Image: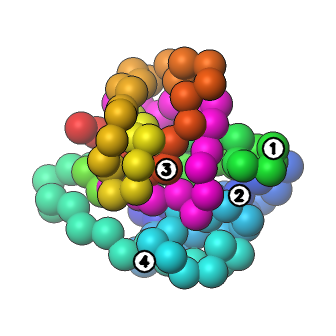
Amino acid sequence: MAAVIVPPGMRSLTHVRRSGIALLCGLALTTGLSSTASAASVTAPAAVAAAKGEFHWIGAKGRPYFVENPPGGQCLAMAEKGRAANNRTSARATVYAGKKCKGASKRLAPGQRAPKGFTFASVRFGN
């Protein structure tokens, strides 16, 4: 199942399914490609399943975003720093202050929010 990022007001786009990771709208998770519609190049163990549900955050310019059914075990880099992470998935999410899942991190159980003021540049699910 593909992960799709859309602003919450555009829920109809969450039904888009493509092989790999489809990333759309503004602050897409990316590895340096255009932030308007780019694919992330990531590597993961084959045994880690996608997280079910949504992961929400606020982008650098105050716009809300979410990713639906994010891939498990892969380090996903943000195009810009995110804040107010809210893990509404079935898997544990770890948000990292740095790119490539490096730096200070916070683990978020399903249903948990990141501490107020914590900004992140990358996230991994199921770890």
For image coordinates 81% across by 44% down, the residue present is 62
What is the total number of numbered labels drawn onto the structure image? 4
* Mark found first going from the N terminus, 1 or 4: 4
Residue 6 got which mark?
2
Q: Which quadrant of the rendered structure holds the C terminus?
A: top left
| Tag in front: 2 or 3 | 3
Q: Residues within 10 Å of mark 1 (few under 14, many from 20)?
A: few
As shown in the figure, which amino acid type bears the numbered disc 1?
Gly
| Tag in front: 2 or 1 | 1
* Mark found first going from the N terminus, 3 or 4: 4
Q: Circle 3 sits on which residue?
A: 121
Residue 18 visible in the picture: no
Residue 11 magenta-highlighted? no
Q: Circle 1 sits on which residue?
A: 62
Residue 19 got which mark?
4
> Where is 121 relative to 83, above or below?
below
* Mark found first going from the N terminus, 2 or 1: 2
